[in-house]
């Protein structure tokens, strides 16, 4: 959620740190701060509000030092304020720390440190760490060792960067359950919570594992175990994303850019993975033998938010095509349940960032029970990418907008590939495999035709910009799309929206319907079309307004509803890849018309890295 940037090198640190924070704005935050080595001491400035407020507060003679740390905070312990913003000092104002995560035993540590004479100035759990490091530095000459020993007293999640006036030219980092990356430059090194902060400066990175501590200087870096001090194996990897990919490229918002990138995203997701003329899909990263695939008798998918809805589409798809039962679990609930998995159950976790805290916790709990876990993620080097036993990268490129769009369709696309791969090893015919893969190849061009209707959808949005409630409904494959559409509307336009299976309408939601409460139906001409039309008629009978997403060939539905958005026709299992696009555009245009902050909606963060 929060963002960390640290730099040691030959360049001026302040511009690099501020630029890094701006590149992490999408993660969600309520305050920002920076600390840089000056000529005689560390200078620190922190402000509630956006990074521009922090920038405006920096004096013209702010230190031109070559090392520093910076942070964007999303409040957990302590309200958003200048005081509670990071970095945090120790008693003597010699040590500064920035921290993502939650220190679970901070109350006990606070009591212990108070007895030792430490005084606290903030409400945060993070400040405890600065004082704990200070306490250990009384007996240690090494900042690295003082931080390591302090962390051995800590329970919780953290990604940290620490600097000390008495140890200029070095910064210490560590991670446990919160993302942290080392950037490798020429005569400079970086620490960041997200690779996007590093892209203008380097694409060479190291991904430390949980339980590891980092030391960076201008010339070198080292990674060791927090518990044992043992040197860790550190592989330098090259990031496939470019700095240009993380810019708006002329679009007014990242979200709109990412919506329009979806044709390319699907092409990239399926590139080299299908042979349409043979109806085959290849996914080499699953690490399952054909014999093991044939033994799978149940699949469990675990995710959160938009990734959960992609998994729900996967559930309908896999059950329809393979006849294998699929459980879809909310990770935050699953991790606290009694976990019942058979020996032939295949488990998936899905996360765009690969750092979703609840999903990672569920992954580890499944592995603790002795089961293999596969991952679907967009970020190489993420915790989920490293800790799963295999999986599928979606290759969507950096997704900056908080409301996920292109990662969602990429997740569905790779779940289609998985279903075809599994199916062709089982009883899926060549013809059925060809039908699916050939239709999938056509999807990008069909999405492009929908994107051409963006202005038309904007005009529809103008009709609904002042409503405060919306009911989204769909059936079968399009029920998850109704859920996802309602989520997008809530996330970025702050309109209350509920997603429901259309058949559930008469079991309560229809009581809400009146002239001020419109309904949106996802109703392509599929196997449940007639049932969905009946539900629409029931809304119309109660004088409710209806907006529908339907098939281009449908001549009757447009006559029944107030507004109609047509999508091209495809096979039923692939419909979600098309029907979700108008819902994304509708949410986007409504948010813009309502003057909402589209890319940084209130109270939300891109990656939820704390529970």
Image (tube, rainbow, N blue to C red):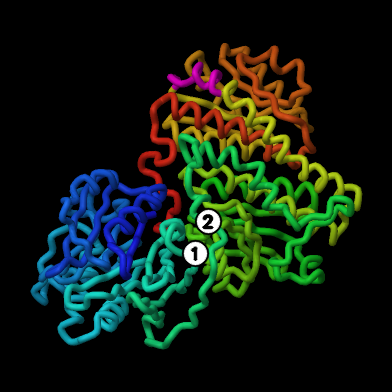
Is 254 rendered above or below residue 46?
above
Is 345 rendered above or below residue 314?
below
Tell me the quarter of the picture where residue 573 sits.
top right
Tell me the quarter of the picture where residue 520 sits.
top right
Q: In this view, does 113 lie to the left or right of 357?
A: left
Q: Is residue 84 left or right of residue 408?
A: left
Q: Position of residue 534 (x, y in %)?
A: 70, 21
Quadrant for the N terminus, please. bottom left
For the question of whether residue 107 can be seen, the reply is no
Q: Which secondary structure lies at badge 1?
A: loop
Q: Which residue is drawn at 41% across and 25% down?
A: 594
Is 175 rendered above or below residue 196?
below
Is 497 rendered above or below residue 383?
above
Q: Position of residue 264 (x, y in %)?
A: 65, 45
Q: In this view, does 413 lie to the left or right of 492?
A: right
Q: Residue at x 63, y 50 (%)?
A: 411
N-terminal-most mark, 1 or 2: 1
Region rendered in magenta: 458-467
Which residue position is annotated with label 1?
A: 203
**Residue 261 circle label:** none
Q: Does the magenta stretch include residue 464?
A: yes
Which residue position is annotated with label 2?
A: 242
What is the spatial separation of the Cα atoms under label 1 and label 2, in whole angstroms? 8 Å
- Mark 2, Cα crowd under 10 Å, few <14 / some 14-19 / many 20+, is some
Give the tally of numbered discs: 2
Q: Disc 1 vs disc 2: Cβ atoms closer than 8 Å?
A: yes
Q: Where is residue 188 in the image (x, y as percent from the top left)?
A: 37, 71
Main SS, magenta region, reads: helix
Q: Which secondary structure lies at badge 2?
A: loop
For the question of whether residue 116 can be seen, the reply is yes
* Residue nearest the viewer, comparing 321 with 243: 243
């Amino acid at each position: 959620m929060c963002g960390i940037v640290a730099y040691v090198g030959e360049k001026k640190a302040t511009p690099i740190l501020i630029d890094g924070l701006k590149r992490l704005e999408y993660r969600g935050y309520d305050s920002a701060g920076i600390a840089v080595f000056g000529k005689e001491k560390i200078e620190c400035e922190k402000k509630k509000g956006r990074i521009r407020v922090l920038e405006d507060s920096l004096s013209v003679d702010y230190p031109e030092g070559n090392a520093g740390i910076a942070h964007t905070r999303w409040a957990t312990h302590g309200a958003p304020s200048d005081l509670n913003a990071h970095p945090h000092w120790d008693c003597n104002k010699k040590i500064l720390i920035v921290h993502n995560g939650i220190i679970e035993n901070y109350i006990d540590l606070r009591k212990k440190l108070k007895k030792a004479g430490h005084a606290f100035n903030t409400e945060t759990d993070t400040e405890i760490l600065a004082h704990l490091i200070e306490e250990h530095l009384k007996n240690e000459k090494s900042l690295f060792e003082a931080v390591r020993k302090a962390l051995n007293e800590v329970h919780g999640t953290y990604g940290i960067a620490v600097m000390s006036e008495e140890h200029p030219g070095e910064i210490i980092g560590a991670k446990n359950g919160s993302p942290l990356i080392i950037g490798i430059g020429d005569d400079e090194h970086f620490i960041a919570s997200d690779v996007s902060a590093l892209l203008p400066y380097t694409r060479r990175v190291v991904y430390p594992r949980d339980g590891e501590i980092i030391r960076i200087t201008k010339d070198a870096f080292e990674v060791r175990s927090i518990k044992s001090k043992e040197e860790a194996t550190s592989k330098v990897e090259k990031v496939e994303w470019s700095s240009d990919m993380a810019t708006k490229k002329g679009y007014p918002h990242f979200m709109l850019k990412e919506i329009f990138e979806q044709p390319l995203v699907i092409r990239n997701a399926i590139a080299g993975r299908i042979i349409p003329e043979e109806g085959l899909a290849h996914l080499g990263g699953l690490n399952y033998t054909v014999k093991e695939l044939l033994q799978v008798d149940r699949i469990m998918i675990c995710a959160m938010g938009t990734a959960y809805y992609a998994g729900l589409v996967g559930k309908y798809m896999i059950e329809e095509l393979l006849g294998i039962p699929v459980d879809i679990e909310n990770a935050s609930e699953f991790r606290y349940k009694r976990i019942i998995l058979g020996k032939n159950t295949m488990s998936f976790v899905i996360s765009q960032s690969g750092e979703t805290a609840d999903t990672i916790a569920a992954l580890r709990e499944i592995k603790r029970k002795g089961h293999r876990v596969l991952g679907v993620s967009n970020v190489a080097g993420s915790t989920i990418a490293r800790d799963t036993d295999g999986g599928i990268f979606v290759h969507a490129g950096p997704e900056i907008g908080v409301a996920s769009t292109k990662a969602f369709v990429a997740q569905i696309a790779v779940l289609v590939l998985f279903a075809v791969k599994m199916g062709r090893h089982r009883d899926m015919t060549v013809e059925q495999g060809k039908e699916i893969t050939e239709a999938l190849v056509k999807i990008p061009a069909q999405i492009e035709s929908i994107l051409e209707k963006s202005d038309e959808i904007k005009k529809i949005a103008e009709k609904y910009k002042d409503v405060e409630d919306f009911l989204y409904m769909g059936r079968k494959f399009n029920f998850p799309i109704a859920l996802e559409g309602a989520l997008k509307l809530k996330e970025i336009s702050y309109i209350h929206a509920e997603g429901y299976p259309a058949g559930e309408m008469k079991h309560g939601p229809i009581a809400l319907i009146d002239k001020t409460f419109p309904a949106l139906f996802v109703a392509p001409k599929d196997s449940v079309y007639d049932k969905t039309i009946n539900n629409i008629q029931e809304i119309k009978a109660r004088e409710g307004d209806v907006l529908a997403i339907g098939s281009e060939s449908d001549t009757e539905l447009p006559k029944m509803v107030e507004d109609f958005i047509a999508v091209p026709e495809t096979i039923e299992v692939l419909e979600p890849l098309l029907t979700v696009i108008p819902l994304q555009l509708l949410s986007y245009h409504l948010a813009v018309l309502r003057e909402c902050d589209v890319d940084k909606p209130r109270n939300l963060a891109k990656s939820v890295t704390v529970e």
